Image (cartoon, helix red, strand yellow):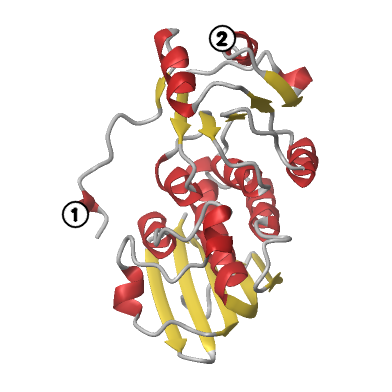
């Protein structure tokens, strides 16, 4: 589906990236902890988060996250918008809570960028 | 790293400590640089993640620091050198979930004790040297 479809499904406001709504998306990752995003999110995914600070943009840039959806009706900080415009990472905002946001996208075909984490032993 | 290896690129980037004002700027810069060198996407991504976690550490815990990037045809070396409180127990700090973070750090989406284990997860070599009260020196290598 496209980011435009995502916008419609989530009745979302576009804060950054009006010109990028045509991008194709297949997967997503949701978290408020950026270190978990860094550990598990895959390139090209949507990031669903309740955070609004510039670190959501830096984290997305580092990981090649396609676009950010801010949940629970929160609005990105001014410096977050500025950085996202600079790095060309779209930010949308929805009033739906994280669970509903994920559920609504999943029903329409977006899946998690991973299903489960690997056995911890693999990393230690 | 072998001293006679050809260094393709080397630079040191200052990082401001104890503030999130510019946190992530250096990693974004490093990622752009590596991307321009036409290195494999996965390698660039791993190096960027490692640099970012190390940069966030300096922003969280150190007075000041720098990130040194050195690229050879075989590998990317990233060093994060800071002046600050240092790490008391490295083995403990490496444990996933162990954290000494403050509320300010949590609000930014960090501080859950994942940083060092993330660095370990994405690098091919990882070493920490630290002296309490002086600072920490992280060295990471990503093979190309």
| Residue at the (24%, 42%) spot, across then down | A118
x and y percent of residue A39 in the render? 41, 47
- Residue lying at 62% horizontally and 71% vertically, measured from the top left: B67
Foreground pick, B27 / B115: B115
Name the residue beneath numbered marker 1: A121
x and y, in percent, of residue B13 in the image: 70, 70
Q: Which mark is residue A9?
A: 2
SS state under label 2: helix
**Residue B72 screen position, x and y as percent:** 56, 64
The residue depicted at 45 percent of the width and 19 percent of the height is A100
Q: Earlier in the sequence, mark 2 or mark 1?
A: 2
Q: Is residue B26 left or right of residue B126?
A: right
Say if mark 2 contacts mark 1, CB within 8 Å. Answer: no
Cα–Cα gap, marks 2 and 1: 39 Å
Depicted B107 relative to depicted B136: above or below = above
Kindly identify which chain the residue marked by label 2 belongs to: A
Task: State which quadrant residue A7 falls in.
Answer: top right
Q: Is residue B111 above or below residue A77?
A: below
Mark 2 crowdedness (10 Å alpha carbons): few <14, some 14-19, many ≥20: some
Find residue A77 and report its horizontal and vertical position in percent.
Answer: 74, 42
Q: Is residue A121 visible to us here?
A: yes
Q: Quadrant of the C terminus of chain A?
A: bottom left
Secondary element at tag 1: helix
- Visible residue check, residue B72: no
Task: Look at the picture and state if A102 lies above or below B37.
Answer: above
């Amino acid at each position: 589906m496209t980011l435009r479809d995502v916008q419609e499904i989530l009745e979302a406001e576009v804060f950054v990236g009006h010109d990028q709504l045509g991008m194709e998306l297949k997967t997503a990752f949701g978290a408020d902890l950026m270190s978990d995003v860094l550990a598990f999110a895959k390139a090209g995914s949507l990031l669903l988060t309740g955070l609004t600070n510039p670190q959501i943009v830096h984290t997305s840039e580092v990981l090649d996250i396609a676009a950010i959806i801010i949940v629970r009706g929160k609005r990105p900080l001014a410096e977050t918008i500025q950085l996202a415009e600079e790095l060309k990472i779209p930010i949308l905002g929805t009033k739906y809570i994280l669970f509903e946001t994920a559920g609504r996208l999943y029903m329409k075909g977006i899946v998690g960028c991973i299903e489960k984490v690997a056995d911890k032993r693999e990393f230690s | 790293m072998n001293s006679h290896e050809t260094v393709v690129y080397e630079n040191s980037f200052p990082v401001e400590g104890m503030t999130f004002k510019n946190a992530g700027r250096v990693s974004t810069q490093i990622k752009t640089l590596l991307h321009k060198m036409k290195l494999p996407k996965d390698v660039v991504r791993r190096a960027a993640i490692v640099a970012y976690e190390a940069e966030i550490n300096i922003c969280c815990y150190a007075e000041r620091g720098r990130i040194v990037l050195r690229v050879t045809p075989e590998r990317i070396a990233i060093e994060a050198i800071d002046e600050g409180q240092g790490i008391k127990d490295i083995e403990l700090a490496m444990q996933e979930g162990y954290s000494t973070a403050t509320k300010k750090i949590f609000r930014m989406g960090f501080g859950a004790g994942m940083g060092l284990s993330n660095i370990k997860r994405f690098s091919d070599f990882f070493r920490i040297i630290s002296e309490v009260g002086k600072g920490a020196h992280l060295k990471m290598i990503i093979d190309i």
